[in-house]
Image: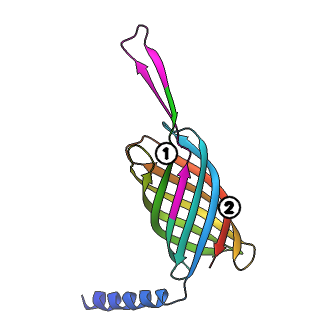
Amino acid sequence: MKKICILSVFVMFLSFAAFAQAGSGYLSILPGYQFSSGDVDDSFVMSLDGGYFFNDNWGLHLGLMYDEGKFDFGKVLLPTVPPTWEELKFKDSFYVFEIGPELAGEVGKGQMYWQIINLGHTMGLDENEWTYGTAVGYRYPINDKWGFNVQGAYHRIDDYDTDHWDLRLGFTYKF
């Protein structure tokens, strides 16, 4: 028991030292294309991502994503003879606001990152829903402040039978 207490205190002080480093922030504009399954058609997406790194590896990610929202609900009309397929297509663009931890590491000249689990909520739909997702990407610096950013992401919206996979390419500003 004594060893566990000593180890706990050591880990606690180690974590304080890790967070005492000077932090850095970033802001990214990432247009891209979404590949969906279920009732949402492939469409254009756009995100404005920001975050703050407490040290070289750990940060907090905030994101606001726009989705064109091309929905394609089809259903079989059973009372008809023969059964008829009715196509219900509509467009209902929406936004997703998300927040979550981010883990990053230096790979070559740039920075590889993983947004571990982003929790969020949709805005703009008739019935707004909770969402969760994850993303992986690479930031390649042009100079000390600007860089390119490529990101692949997955989102799942609660109560919709859809998987949103998207690929985005944009610019990052570091501050």
Q: Quadrant of residue 16?
A: bottom left
Magenta segment's dominant SS is strand
Is 158 situated left or right of 97 in this image? left
Q: In which quarter of the image is residue 168?
A: bottom right
| Residue 118 location (% of width, % of height) | 45, 61
Q: In which quarter of the image is residue 174?
A: bottom right
Check the image and report above or below for 65 versus 69. below
Between 2 and 33, the one nearer to me in the picture:
33
Q: Which region is colored magenta?
A: 63-87
Amino acid type of the residue tagged 1 in the rendering: Asp
| Residue 81 location (% of width, % of height) | 41, 7
Q: Neighbour class for label 2 at 10 Å: few (<14), some, many (≥20)? A: some
Of the numbered discs 1 and 2, the one sitting upstream in the chain is 1
| Residue 36 location (% of width, % of height) | 54, 42
Q: Quadrant of the C terminus?
A: bottom right
Residue 82: say if magenta: yes
Report which residue position mark 2 lands on.
170
Between 121 and 158, the one nearer to me in the picture:
121
- Asked which secondary structure carries label 1, the reply is strand
Residue 3: say if magenta: no
Mark toward the viewer: 1 or 2: 2
Check the image and report above or below for 130 versus 89. below
Report which residue position mark 1 lands on.
163
